[in-house]
Image: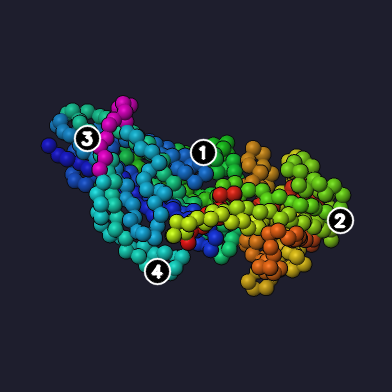
Amino acid sequence: MKNIILLLFLSFQTLSLVFANGGVVDENHFKKTGNIRLLQQADISLLKEDLRIKIINDTTFIEVTYFLQNNGNTQSVHYGFPVDMYKSAWRANNYVSLLDFDIWVNDIPAKYSYWRVNDAYESSQYNEEDNQKYVSKIDRQWYALKLDFEKETTQTLTIKYTIQNYHSDDYYGFGFIPTSSERKFVYDLFPSSSWSDGIVNDFFVQIDLSDLKKHECKYKIEGLENVKSQNKDGIYTFKSQNFDLKKRSYLAVIYDNEKRAIADCLQKKYQPFPILSISSSAKNTEYLIDNDPNTVWKAKEGDWIEIKLPKKMISYKIFRTDKIDSTSRRIDYPIGITFLNGNYSSKESFETESRVKKVIVKVNDTMIKNNQGEEYNNLSLDKAYFFNKKSVFECLVSPFKDNLMMYIFQSSDVTNIRPHKDYVHTIFIQIQKSTSESKEINISDLYLFGYQDWYGKNRSF
């Protein structure tokens, strides 16, 4: 009796969260997933492989079916699915395994055994945050199953699982909007080349990127030539007879998901910050803060908006090592400002009417500039698009990614402001340039954001 171990290798690093002082805010380094692999010779052929991949946001759903033929006598085949995870202290452990995992044999759900091997081996990795190399111990989790073959019979093996795609979203310094990395999903085809002569008689792949297309993500598929899409729906297919796994060893989907990464941050980390009053040099100023994309503030180059901030107080609890806890209060500040840039009352209006290209932003009469002394004024027009069925948060743009609270601190002596005294901070925005020669602009809504109420409420000493 011959034993066969079928392996699907996964290597990954886990998620880290660092908010206030910069660094990684959302990271996942699943390196790759891939085909089954024979570790020793066996008289079993891979007749057909049906691989279906569907990417939604930052998650990939995989369903792969193998049609296996036993060319010899009755035998039992043992195969396993390992999940490898880094044990480093400098990584958090939010992504420690597959999101789900299921097996079917001949369309019947199969039970599998699970075990964990601590410190299975060591691996080196490089952390760009602190320019250091680390050696980490690796724990391996095993999902395993025995497959019994009768003489000269065929069986179907179906595996379904879900993983998070490679990405790393960062804040630089005191940030408001994260810098989003490209997303990457890699599927390794080469391991199945160990079956028989490494050639699959019938090979089919479907890659469903309709969700990425719906959200206007830029993407590319690598590793497979002649991948075809029908009706421009974002669903790609590949078919081949006698496909040689030794020569074409992988497929990859690499894509930009910045709009949703920013929208996710705005919704989960922040909340709308109140406005005490707002005025402008054009009519219908109230349209800027009515949270209605169908009402539009129309202005021209040179027009301005002035926002006055309220004195918003929040309470937080102080936990002390001497077990004498106390509650204190402090003034809360906005973290960032965003625009729904353009006329969003209809898709036609959005596409034909002008938007803001550049602005001047002042906080308490102090111009906002970056570390090089350059003004922040670009509204990222390449990211402006009509939302259709998408979230409004995906369409918001900002003139700067830095933390607005930092500029409030720099522009005033906040250390002398006492909670019981009145104070007013102002944000001044002037339209510097339009996208049109007419010099007219349209803004559907303006939003200030602050931290969620839970953020920064508790402190330990």
Q: Which mark is residue 132?
A: 4
Q: Amino acid at mark 3?
A: Lys
Q: Mark 2 to mark 1: distance in Å?
A: 49 Å
| Amino acid type, residue under disc 1 in the picture | Ile
Under mark 2, the amino acid is Ser
Q: Nearer the viewer, mark 4 or mark 3?
A: 4
Mark number displayed over residue 281 = 2
Query: Where residue 63 sits in the image (x, y, percent)?
Result: 39, 36
> Does residue 51 appear to the left or right of 179 in the view shown?
left
**Eye-nearest disc, 1 or 4:** 4
Front one among 8 and 249: 8
As measured in the structure, the alpha-carbon distance from the residue carrying label 3 to the one carrying label 1 is: 34 Å
**Is residue 14 at least partly visible in the picture?**
yes
Q: Which x, y percent locates residue 107? A: 33, 26
Asked if the residue under mark 4 is in contact with the one under mark 2, i.e. CB atoms within 8 Å, the reply is: no
Residue in view at x 16 percent, y 33 percent: 75
